[in-house]
C-alpha cells in the first residue's frame, strides 16, 4: 500500500511539473510572438506575398542607376515592392547614388543570446514605481524560430544555426531578444529587444507586459537607444 501511495505521489508531481512547464512555455511563446509582431509585423507584410513584378525595360540584376532621381524613381515604383536595395549591415554600398538592385527574399537574422541586466530592471522599476511587483525570476531559454507566430513574408534565420555570418549575407536586419523575466505570479514580464537594420539604423526597447484575461499585452515600452 505504501509503495502504491508513493508511486501515486510521484506520478502526481510529474504531471503537475509537466503541466506547469507547458503553461510556462506557452506564455513565453506568446510574449515572443507579440514583441516580434509589434516591432516587425504589420498588415502590409502579412497575407499572400505579391507576385514577382516584371523587370523594367533594359534592366538586369546588376544594372546601376547613374543619378539620384533614377534610383529614387525605381525605388518608389509600385512594381519594385519585391525588391530591396543591397545594403550591408557594416558597409553602405551606395556610392555617388549608383545603386545595385537585386531581387532577394526578405530575411531576418534572429538571435536570443542577450540577457536582461540588473540595470534594466532598476530602470523600469524606477519608472513605474510600486505599481507592479518586480521580484523577477530569470528564465534562460534557447528560442526556436518556429516559436514565433505570424512571421509574415519574411524568412527568419536563427543565428544559433550558423558558425559564422558573412558580412555580405543579404538580409533585412538582425533582431535580438533577451531572456524573459517574470514576477512570481507570472502575470507580469519584462524583456529587452533590439533591432539592427543597417550601419546607421537600429534601436533597442525594454518592454513591460501584463497578462489580462489570459492574454499578454504590452503596457509599457521604453526606447533605450536609437541609431
Image: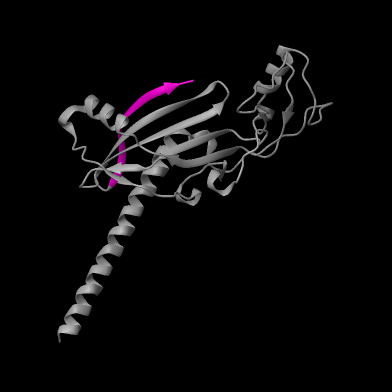
Residue 165 vs 61, above or below: the answer is: below
Which residue occupies 49% across, 20% down?
227
Classified by dominant secondary structure, the portion drawn in magenta counts as strand
Whether residue 4 is situated above or below residue 75 in the rendered picture:
below
Q: In x, y percent, where is residue 190?
A: 31, 37
Residue at the outermost bottom position:
1
Report the number of discs.
0
Q: Where does residue 30 sit, x and y in percent of width and height?
A: 37, 47
Estimate the x, y position of residue 187 in percent, counting from the top left. 24, 44
Q: Residue furthest right?
A: 58
Question: Is residue 220 highlighted in magenta?
Answer: yes
User: Which residue occupies the foreground of this view, 201 or 55?
Assistant: 201
Give above or below for 160 relative to 76: below
Give the image location of residue 58, x and y in percent.
Answer: 84, 26
Report the residue at 54% width, 36% height from top: 45
Tell me, what colour scheme is on the image? Answer: one colour
Q: Residue at x 46, y 47 (%)?
A: 148
Residue at figure coordinates x 53%, y 23% from the top left = 201
Residue in the foreground of this view, choosing between 209 and 168: 168
Q: Is residue 151 magenta?
A: no
Q: Range of the magenta residues?
A: 215-227
Q: Quadrant of residue 215?
A: top left
Q: Nearer the viewer, residue 56 or 19?
A: 19
Tell me the quarter of the picture where residue 137 sits: top left
- Would you say 111 lies left or right of 2 here? right
Q: Identify the image quadrant of the N terminus.
A: bottom left
Amino acid at each position: 500500500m505504501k509503495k502504491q501511495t508513493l508511486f501515486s505521489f510521484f506520478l502526481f508531481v510529474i504531471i503537475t511539473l509537466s503541466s506547469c512547464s507547458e503553461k510556462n512555455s506557452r506564455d513565453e511563446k506568446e510574449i515572443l510572438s507579440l514583441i516580434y509582431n509589434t516591432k516587425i509585423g504589420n498588415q502590409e507584410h502579412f497575407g499572400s506575398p505579391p507576385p514577382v513584378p516584371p523587370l523594367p525595360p533594359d534592366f538586369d540584376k546588376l544594372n546601376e542607376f547613374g543619378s539620384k532621381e533614377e534610383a529614387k524613381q525605381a525605388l518608389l515604383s509600385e512594381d519594385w515592392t519585391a525588391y530591396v536595395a543591397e545594403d550591408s549591415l557594416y558597409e553602405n554600398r551606395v556610392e555617388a547614388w549608383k545603386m545595385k538592385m537585386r531581387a532577394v527574399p526578405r530575411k531576418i537574422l534572429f538571435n536570443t543570446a542577450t540577457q536582461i541586466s540588473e540595470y534594466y530592471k532598476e530602470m523600469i522599476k524606477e519608472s513605474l514605481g510600486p505599481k507592479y511587483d518586480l521580484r523577477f525570476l530569470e528564465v534562460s531559454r534557447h528560442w526556436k524560430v518556429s516559436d514565433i507566430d505570424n512571421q509574415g513574408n519574411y524568412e527568419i534565420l536563427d543565428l544559433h544555426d550558423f558558425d559564422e555570418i558573412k558580412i555580405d549575407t543579404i538580409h533585412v536586419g538582425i533582431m535580438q531578444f533577451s531572456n524573459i523575466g517574470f514576477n512570481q505570479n507570472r502575470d507580469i514580464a519584462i524583456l529587452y529587444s533590439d533591432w539592427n537594420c543597417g550601419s546607421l539604423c537600429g534601436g533597442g526597447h525594454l518592454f513591460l507586459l501584463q497578462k489580462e484575461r489570459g492574454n499578454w499585452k504590452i503596457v509599457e515600452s521604453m526606447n533605450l537607444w536609437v541609431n
